[in-house]
Image: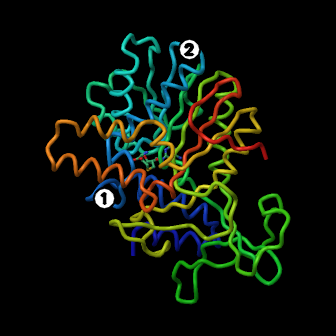
């Protein structure tokens, strides 16, 4: 049993069951035993591999889009590039290298911010950035960022923010909670109270056992981003896995050493995420007067020039390097890899005409 599991059991004994969101939050960010606060999650030796860790092309093509968004915003200078949840710092490094090639005259006078909740990962990001770290500032939340036009970017940040789950059973909705079973083990069960009707899906009656996920934490983060874009201008670009339309389903999942495991099996030692409801995030942005665009990751990367970039990197390289680059393209954009499951959401004020994404109609 993990140290965190023992503490969570004592907490449930003392204070009763907790919401799935409270459980997720403790597992990921508990200061003493949380996953992001104590472990090194990424890469082949870690628990999961993210797009920036697969290929430099991912960060480079994000930079191409961000640069176009900066130009479409009227080239404000200085402009802040703020990455949310930067992991190892790889994407920021690759974006900055690409940005330097795109903005040779340094017209953007780019300022750099990394928003990271884990002090351990912030230290790793500083290391990855090397000499580029001199210009960068670290912040624990979006609220701490300085004002001014901002280009927000984030990969797999929303999926790491906690969700609450509701289940339809016996003709009504219940909140799913983490309690203790008869053997004293952590167990998912239905809570006694009636959930807030505003949190529940409207309209069509749900099928028996349907699960509905909502994430106030994701909405708050999008509110913060959208509020800043509304006030100061700029744009936001977010990659994550999830669905473009609202859908029922229990999508909470734990991954450890590249394998799925039960979500209650080892609190604090496995990554815990759930699918992102992009329509909810887009609606939040639209409430702030922003436009929202969505695409699959594959379509986005192809539109930004993935194949051309791969061709350039591979040109003159040996057969082994060319095969590696082809493999990277396949993993990032292939329909059976990340290309379709992963989506992109872009947000900006309506006057900023952004390239290459499908507009999401206001809901
Ligand atoms: N973007 C990186 C890492 C994704 S994992 C990549 O693609 O490789 C999620 C990241 O978000 C981690 O860096 C984690 O520490 C950070 N994070 C999780 N919750 C956060 C929060 N509430 N605020 C800021 N960062 C958070």
CA distance separating discs 2 and 1? 39 Å
* Marks 2 and 1, the one that precedes in the sequence: 1
Question: If the image is split into quadrants, where does the N terminus sit?
Answer: bottom left
* Colour pattern of the rendering: rainbow
Instruction: Check the image and report above or below for 320 versus 211.
Output: above
Q: Is residue 125 above or below residue 249?
A: above
Q: Residue, x 47% and y 76% (percent of image)?
A: 262
Where does residue 3 sit, x and y in percent of width and height?
A: 40, 68
Residue shown at the point (54%, 37%) measured from the top left: 237
Label 2 sits on residue:
76
Residue, x 55% and y 26% (percent of image)? 69
Q: Quadrant of residue 229?
A: top right
Residue 4's x, y, as percent?
44, 66
Residue sitting at the far bottom: 182
Left-right relation of 236 to 322: right
Residue 215: x percent and y percent?
65, 55
Q: Are dots 2 and 1 in contact, CB under 8 Å?
A: no
In depth, the one of 48 and 29 nearer the eye is 48
For this rendering, which residue is in front, 99 or 186? 99
Q: Nearer the viewer, residue 194 or 104?
A: 104
- Give the residue at x 61% y 72%: 14
Front tag of 2 and 1 = 2
Q: State the residue position of label 1.
A: 46
Q: Mark 1: few, some, or many residues within 10 Å (few <14, many ≥20)?
A: few
């Amino acid at each position: 049993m993990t140290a965190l599991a023992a503490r969570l059991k004592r907490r449930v004994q003392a204070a009763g069951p907790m919401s799935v969101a409270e459980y997720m939050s403790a597992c990921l960010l508990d200061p003493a035993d949380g996953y992001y606060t104590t472990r090194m999650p990424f890469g082949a030796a870690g628990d999961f591999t993210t797009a920036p860790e697969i290929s430099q092309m991912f960060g480079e093509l994000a930079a191409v889009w961000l640069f176009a968004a900066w130009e479409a915003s009227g080239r404000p200078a200085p402009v802040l590039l703020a990455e949310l949840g930067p992991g190892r710092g790889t994407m920021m490094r690759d974006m900055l290298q690409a940005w330097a090639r795109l903005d040779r005259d340094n017209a953007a006078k780019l300022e750099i911010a990394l928003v990271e909740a884990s002090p351990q990962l912030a230290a790793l990001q500083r290391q990855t950035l090397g000499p580029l770290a001199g210009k960068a500032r670290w912040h624990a939340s979006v609220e701490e960022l300085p004002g001014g036009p901002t280009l927000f970017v984030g990969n797999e940040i929303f999926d790491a923010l906690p969700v609450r789950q509701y289940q339809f059973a016996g003709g009504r909705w219940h909140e799913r909670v983490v309690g203790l079973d008869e053997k004293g083990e952590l167990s998912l069960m239905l809570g006694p109270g009636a959930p807030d009707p505003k949190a529940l899906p409207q309209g069509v009656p749900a099928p028996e056992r349907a699960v509905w996920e909502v994430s106030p934490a994701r909405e708050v983060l999008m509110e913060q981003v959208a509020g800043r874009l509304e006030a100061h201008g700029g744009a936001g670009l977010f990659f994550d896995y999830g669905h473009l339309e609202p859908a029922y389903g229990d999508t909470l999942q734990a991954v450890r050493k590249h394998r799925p495991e039960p979500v209650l099996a080892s609190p604090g030692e496995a990554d815990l995420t759930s699918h992102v409801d992009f329509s909810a995030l887009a609606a939040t942005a639209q409430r702030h007067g922003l436009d929202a665009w969505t695409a699959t990751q594959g379509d986005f990367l192809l539109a930004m020039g993935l194949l051309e970039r791969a061709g350039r990197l591979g040109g003159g390289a040996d057969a082994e390097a060319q095969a590696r680059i082809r493999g990277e393209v396949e993993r990032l954009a292939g329909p059976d890899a990340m290309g379709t499951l992963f989506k992109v959401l872009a947000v900006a004020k309506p006057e900023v005409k952004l390239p290459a994404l499908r507009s999401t109609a206001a809901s």
